[in-house]
Image (cartoon, grey):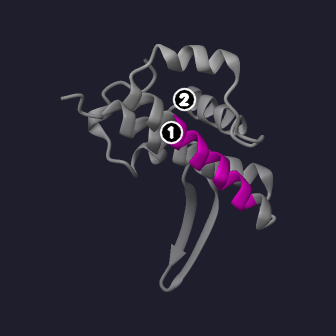
Amino acid sequence: MEIGDWDRFTGNTIGAFVGLVPSEHSSGASRSQGSITKTGNGHARRLLVEAAWHHRPRYRIGKVMHERWDRAPAAARARGDAGNQRLHHRWVTFIDRRKRSTTANVAIARELAGWCWSLAVLDDS
């Protein structure tokens, strides 16, 4: 397992753990953000960034996904569908705002990391 104990994170610290937060150079009242820090687990960061690219095309559920979803609990199915729709909608928003695709993808990867954390610490009781 690349992450280890998910309970040690909060929703906004998982992005920092995998290095998907912007670097910052601040002095007094000035604040300047740079590229992502790339600290932490590089393998997990790469997986998240690659997974984020898959949310860019039009969201659709194919035959294979329907078969997998048929074996999943209804709550997991609903949560997965809502998350996938939200991440695709974020892509659409970034495209409409004419953001660079690489910048948008890292932002979506950071959100995906938080979503994975929320699923990992979800209480099944």
Disc 1 is placed on an element classified as: loop
Task: Specify the quadrant of the image occupied by residue 66.
Answer: top right
Left/right of residue 73 with respect to residue 41 in the rendered view: left
Q: Using a 10 Å C-alpha cutoff, classify the residue at mark 2 as few (fewer than 14 neighbours), some (14 to 19) or many (20 or more).
A: some
* Mark 1 in CB contact with mark 2 (< 8 angstroms): yes
Query: What residue appears at the point 23 percent right and 33 percent down from the top-left corner?
Result: 123
x, y (%) of residue 122?
Answer: 29, 34
Query: What residue appears at the point 49 percent right and 37 percent down from the top-left corner?
Result: 40
Q: Is residue 19 visible?
A: no
**Magenta stretch, residue numbers:** 81-94
Query: What residue appears at the point 68 percent right and 40 percent down from the top-left corner?
Result: 55
**Most foreground residue, 11 or 54:** 54
Give the alpha-carbon distance from disc 1 to disc 2, as whole Å.
6 Å
Name the residue at the bottom extreme.
29
Disc 2 is placed on an element classified as: helix
Tell me if residue 90 is in the magenta stretch. yes
**Does 4 appear above or below 24?**
above
Pointer 1 or 2: first along the chain: 1
Q: Is residue 23 visible?
A: yes
Residue corresponding to mark 1: 18
Left/right of residue 109 with respect to residue 6 in the rendered view: right
Q: Amino acid at mark 2?
A: Ala
Left/right of residue 27 with respect to residue 36 in the rendered view: left
Image quarter in which the C terminus is found: top left
Residue corresponding to mark 2: 44
